Image (cartoon, rainbow, N blue to C red):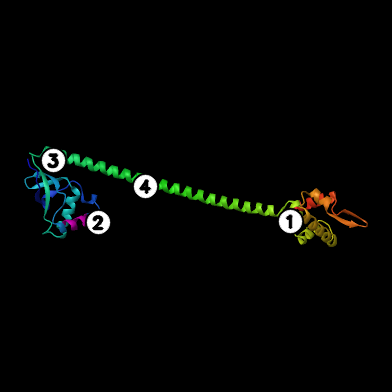
């Protein structure tokens, strides 16, 4: 048995699936394509219901699209290609129809499943992107905060220079200012700063005690310590507060 298609008049065919089951736009588009191609690319499967009439077994959409094509242009859309189930091929064609229907149903479910998977994937991706973005923003905020803290710490370290470094490195003018802030009058502060400059040029100070022992000013016929130990402690306390 050789399987071949036959041309059957649309008006002789009926479908158990109503036309309303399909979208009008889809049927209209398919009908125009049928008219352009002068036929359907997928022949329908029909069964003889009487001598001159048939019913659709498979291809209900194609049938309704062809029927619409006949409405648009009756002379071009009178016939449709079809496989006719007769007694000699009924078993074979019926099995094919059932198998292909099952395959279409499985493909539809698989496509739907894949679409749902993709939709969920996109949702998960969006959620992950949002979390990563928030994490980056939090990290950026944390970095900015840390940077500000480091700057502030560096500023404090500059402001809180070790007292011995003041005697070792600051200029006379700055030392005078520091001493004045510690309670010395300008004249004595200038006198002490000058001696500090002289002494450290001879040999750099090793400690605050070294400053106390070496920095001396005239007092009558003798030299006395310009900064007593008690005064040095007071100076250190004041400088440490700033």
Span highlighted in magenta in the image: 27-34
- Taking depth in this image into account, of 73 and 120 the one nearest to the observer is 120
Tell whether label 4 touches label 3 (CB within 8 Å): no
Cβ–Cβ under 8 Å for marks 1 and 3: no
Query: Crowding at label 1, few (<14), some or many (≥20) Cα neighbours within 10 Å?
Result: few
Identify the residue shown where x is 37% and y is 47%. 119
Residue 30 in the image: state x and y as whole percent: 20, 55
CA gap between label 1 and label 3 equals 106 Å
Marks 3/2: CA–CA distance:
31 Å
Q: Position of residue 105 (x, y in %)?
A: 25, 42
Indicate which label's residue lies in the foreground, 1 or 3: 1
Q: Which mark is residue 93?
A: 3
Tell me the quadrant of the picture where the C terminus can be found.
Answer: bottom right
Left or right of 36, for residue 114: right
- Position of residue 120 measured from the top left corner of the image (x, y, whole percent): 38, 45
- Is residue 37 at least partly visible in the picture? yes
- Find residue 11 and name its label: none
Circle nearer the N terminus (1, 3): 3
Residue 225 coordinates in the image, percent (x, y): 86, 53
* Mark 2 secondary-structure assignment: helix
Residue at (78%, 51%) from the top-left corner?
A: 236
Does residue 186 lie above or below 231 as drawn?
below
Q: Residue at x 79, y 60 (%)?
A: 176
Of the two numbered discs 3 and 4 in the rendering, the one whose residue sits closer to the viewer: 4
Q: Can you identify the residue that label 1 sits on?
A: 169
- Camera-near label (4 vs 2) is 4
User: Does 106 sit left or right of 162 as displayed?
Assistant: left
Checking the image for residue 119, the label placed there is 4
């Amino acid at each position: 048995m050789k399987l071949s298609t036959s041309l059957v008049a649309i008006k002789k065919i009926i479908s158990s699936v109503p036309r309303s089951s399909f979208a009008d736009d889809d049927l209209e588009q398919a009908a125009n394509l049928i008219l352009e191609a002068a036929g359907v690319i997928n022949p329908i499967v029909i069964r003889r219901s009487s001598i001159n009439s048939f019913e659709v077994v498979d291809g209900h959409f194609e049938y309704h699209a062809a029927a619409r094509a006949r409405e648009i242009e009756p002379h071009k859309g009178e016939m449709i290609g079809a496989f006719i189930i007769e007694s000699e091929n009924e078993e074979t064609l019926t099995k094919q129809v059932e198998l292909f229907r099952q395959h279409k149903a499985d493909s539809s479910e698989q496509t739907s499943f894949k679409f749902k998977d993709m939709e969920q994937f996109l949702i998960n991706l969006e959620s992950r992107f949002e979390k990563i973005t928030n994490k980056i923003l939090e990290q950026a905020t944390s970095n900015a905060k840390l940077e500000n803290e480091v700057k502030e710490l560096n500023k404090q370290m500059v402001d809180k220079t070790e007292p011995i470094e003041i005697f070792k490195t600051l200029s006379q003018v700055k030392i005078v200012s520091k001493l004045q802030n510690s309670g010395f009058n300008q004249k004595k502060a200038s006198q002490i700063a000058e001696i500090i400059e002289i002494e450290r040029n001879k040999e750099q100070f090793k400690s605050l005690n070294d400053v106390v022992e070496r920095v001396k000013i005239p007092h009558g016929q003798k030299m006395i310590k310009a900064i007593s130990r008690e005064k040095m402690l007071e100076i250190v306390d004041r400088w440490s507060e700033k």
